[in-house]
Amino acid sequence: MIERASAVVKDSPFLEFRLDYLEKPLAALPKIKSFFAENTAATGIATCRRKENGGKFSGTLAAELEVLGKAAGAGFHLVDLEIESAEALKKGELEKLRETGVALIVSFHDFSATKDLEKVYDRMVPFQPDFFKIVPTAKTLTDNVTLMRFIEKMTESANIVGVCMGEAGIISRVLGLRAGSSFTFAAATQGEETAPGQIAARTLLETYRIDQVDNATKVYGVAGNPIKSSLSPIMLNAAFRRETVNAVYLALQATKVNDLLKLVQELPIQGLSITMPHKQEIMQHLENTDPLSAKIGACNTIMRTQDGKLYGFNTDVAGIVGPLEKRISLKGAKVLVLGAGGAARAAVFGLRDRGAEVFILNRTAETAQKLARQAGAKTIKKEAVAKTQFDVIINATPIGMAGMKGAAMLDAKELNTKLVFDLVYNPIETPLIRLARQQGIPFITGVEMFVQQGARQFEIWTGKPAPEEEMLRVVLHTLRQQAEAAVAEAPVPTKATTIPTKATTKPKKAS
């Protein structure tokens, strides 16, 4: 725990020590006291959350109080006491803790939902904490809005700390400070998260630049399900940083389109990248689209106008056709497209527009047949693929994507082609790309398509030329880091330290 704290304290001097993760918290306090003596600029929160309240500490309430009381003497500036423990205290016990001079955080965690937050606040008021920490779980994207509206309402009368847990909660982790949260929480290092949906401090500071987010910051995002592996936030935030655009781009875990649309209007969000499985369903909710999206029946880019209306574009076609045209002539080319979803539709229509002869192979034959009729393409049966020679084979399915399971659609003997193009970009070397390499077949990785379509999105939203070289650089760097991490032996996570990040736009004073 001290090693982790020592490694991050210069960059992030505001640290929470999860003492409940230690087998003997009291025995550790002398060493932590030495750490604070050596790092006088550090501010420390001591937390010793009991198991019944979502923590790791198996001791009694009296034992928890003893740890927190002695933590104050070891140099901690704040202690975190969960509301359930506060309510179980006998009269006078909380005053003893206050007499140590430490600031008190009373915290509430709901690991299942976002409910009546004002009711939670009212439970905390009798304990007169210095900070009210309220942490629900976002089951929908708009749960983040519920929390942030609550913070905005209460922030003038109390020091509120609020974030939503869960994959959908990243909105509150990035925008919570702007709403008035006194600070937010992040993992000291990636892989050592202490709450569902928590992200690394470096990611919050470098990718999302939370210290620069203010009321004028425009919000964009990528919406899909699943969204965890998307590198769009890294790529687009790098583009905003390079071109000095005051904007932030978030990963939006969108299970339902209606929830996403409500978020767009309430937050509001200025623009969206739409990924699977929503590229087709979103079409019916748009005011208008470019002719390409209307023709394809799928949209991957949305822009919100000042009057709140949504307009759709499709940049997938440019991302697919552009890299191919650098290498071959598409007129008369024989192309096999795997899949029949949103990306496949962009590929099929884009290629047909360039005069290619397109064949579609999809596990659900009816979907392939419908797309073929609409685009003037053909379908092909699996058993015929090995007997047919193609100029290009394009994978427009999620098979091979990081975190996705599913058997490959083609094997070595069916890869009869001059060129392979896998639209999956993460990882760089997908099973299909690896197979092509082994067969000595030239290939295009999904990274090229990913950067091209993202660059066009940036230009639609900002009206500025996209910094494509920077976008490609950060994507390749991240993918290589991920590949190296997967190969290397993973360290045993200590889950010892989290980093509360102070608000810079609206500082609060602890009593």
Image: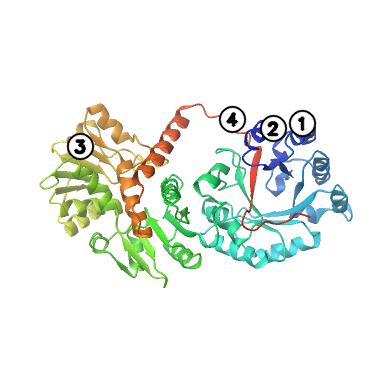
In primary-sequence order, the first of circles 1 and 4 is: 1
Q: Are marks 1 and 2 in contact (CB under 8 Å)?
A: yes
Horizontal arrangement in the rendering, residue 196 relative to residue 160 (left or right): left
Amino acid type shown at disc 3? Leu
Of 163 and 256, the residue lying toward us: 163
Amino acid type, label 1: Lys
Tell me the mark number nearer the camera, choosing from 1 and 3: 1
In the rendered structure, which amino acid carries the disc numbered 2? Ile
Numbered mark located on residue 31 in the image: 1
Asked whether the residues under the numbered discs 1 and 4 touch, taking CB atoms below 8 Å apart as contact, a structural biologist would say: no
**How many dots with numbers?**
4
Query: Are circles 1 and 3 on residues that touch, CB within 8 Å?
Result: no
Residue named by callout 3 = 419
Q: Is residue 82 above or below residue 190?
A: below
Q: Earlier in the sequence, mark 3 or mark 4?
A: 3
- Location of residue 169 with respect to 444 vertically, above or below: below
Quadrant of the drawing holding the N terminus: top right
Give how far apart the Cα atoms at labels 3 and 2 are. 53 Å
Please name which of the two marks, 3 or 4, marks the residue nearer to the observer.
3
* Label 3 Cα neighbours within 10 Å, binned few <14 / some 14-19 / many ≥20: many
The label on residue 251 is none
Q: Which mark is residue 2?
A: 2
Point out the tag, 1 or 2, that comes first from the N-terminus.
Answer: 2
Disc 1 is placed on an element classified as helix
Dots 4 and 2: beta carbons under 8 Å? Answer: no
Of the numbered discs 3 and 2, the one sitting upstream in the chain is: 2
The label number, if any, that marks residue 492 in the structure image:
4
